[in-house]
Image (cartoon, coloured by chain):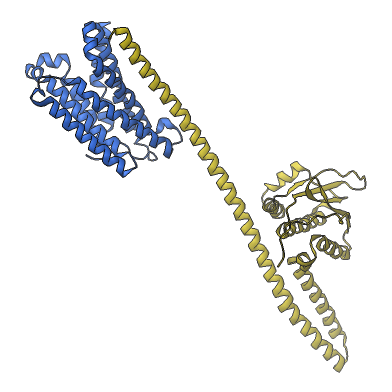
Chain colours: A blue, B yellow
Amino acid sequence: MNWYIEIVKKLSIISALPAIWLGRKQRGYLWYYAWASFLADLLLSENICNLFPFINRIVCGLANLFFLCQLTILSLYLISQLSSVKLKGVAKTILFALVALFLASAGSDFLSKIFWKEQVFGHFFMMILCVLVLFKVIQNIEHQKIEKSPAFLFAACFLLFEAYSVLLFLFTDQFAKVSPSVAQNVWSVHNLLNIMTNLVIARIFYLQRSADIPPFGSDKL
Amino acid sequence: MSLTFLVSFAAITMLVLAVGLVFFVFAYQRRVINHHQQLKDFNHKKQEELIQASIRSEEEERMRIASELHDDVGATLSSIRLMLHQVARSEGAGSAVLQVQSLLDESIQKVRNLSHQLQPGTLHYLGIVKSIQSLAETLNKTGQITVRIEDSAKWPGIHSESELALYRIVQELLNNIIKHAGARQVVIQMFQSNGKAQIRLMHDGDGLTDISYHELLFKKGAIGLKNIENRLKSSHATISFPKPNDPSFSAGILLCLPITEPEEES
């Protein structure tokens, strides 16, 4: 099974490239997230860590930093899709509280330790935002075919990704205790879902080329 | 926590989420279909309102023209006739004067007929039965066709706008029968049956069928039939072309209108 895991790891690194290419003219939140995802997968890969020892020393910090980028960019984007101004205010407050809480929990160990369980709150929060965006999609029914709705594609895909991330990060220690191969397989599924999210972002950029699709994911930072 | 429990828990959670998303897609599609149906109903309603507004403005215009013809042109022609009569009395009625008087009498009668056709005065005061009887008498005088009214005693009271619509439809149908069907005899029956006010026309000319009526309706031109169709829609009446039981008639037309309470006239 090792060859399967290796293939998935490699694919996970390059899966963000189509999104980076297709979104190069539109740019915006999702494009920057695609770049962050690509760089994180690249720098956190075993080959790069072995090649550059200084990266190996700060790999935990990079993982924490990627989580903060992911939480901030994706949450701000999902919040911008909500209709209610009050709800947006509450969501932004919770977001900033989560970021502050994470940084406070990490403290001086930010560079030396990956805080899996602390990340669970952030991923759960993004799950809730995805559900709220799905509610908005079904209320507004902007598109005749739901598969052409960028909001639905984004929210549905990231809902699955964040749900798995919550489960994985909650029980990552237990999986590691069972055996390294089980932990590897479990993380492979996470990589597969990562590939799916990157391809969905590419699909969203592709859909936005069509004139009748309203902009989604093209807001400038 | 055992591995089996963890894996099962994770698998069930992801499965529930996936099934939830599938149901979401079905619910979304159902809402899209309902939304389209609502739009369709709304457009249909708007179209009906437009047709009714168009018919109403047409009738108002006809009333205005009829009124102008009768009060203005008709009165002027009558004055000219009176002056001509005085001239004829004082100077003797030469052949030219007699000819002018005859032409004037003819014009006055034509103006009266036109005014009456545009806005039947009897309809508002005496109802549709008397109006159609009056129309039949006018057509009988032309000698082109014989129109007979039968079984009109049981005609129910209906809304005045519906009566006007039916009158116009009968008027247009009679015009078409004279122009296109080549009929010499027409019988009109007006009665109530199965909770509907019905008008049956039977004639001995070339008639339409339900299929040929709908084919002609979509033909370029066919303005008369389109007007009939618009008036049918606005009054919620229906038209059909049943073959008459009486062998002396070759074609029939049946108009059906659901009965509503007539409005109270002020």
Query: Residue A66 vs residue B161: left or right?
Result: left
Q: Quadrant of residue A90?
A: top left
Give the vertical position of A46 relative to A201 (above or below): above
Q: Nearer the viewer, residue A70 or B73?
A: A70
Q: Nearer the viewer, residue B172 or A62?
A: A62
Give the vertical position of B125 relative to B104 (above or below): above
How far across and down, in percent of the image, does residue A143 sit? 43, 37
How far across and down, in percent of the image, does residue A175 sit? 24, 10
Instruction: State which quarter of the image contains the N terminus of chain B.
Output: top left
How far across and down, in percent of the image, does residue A25 sit? 26, 37
Q: Residue furthest bottom?
A: B90
How far across and down, in percent of the image, does residue B248 sit? 93, 47
Query: Residue A160 vs residue B98: left or right?
Result: left
Residue ID at (75%, 58%): B163
Query: Residue A27 vs residue B241: left or right?
Result: left
Residue ID at (74%, 67%): B119
Query: Residue B20 vs residue A99: left or right?
Result: right
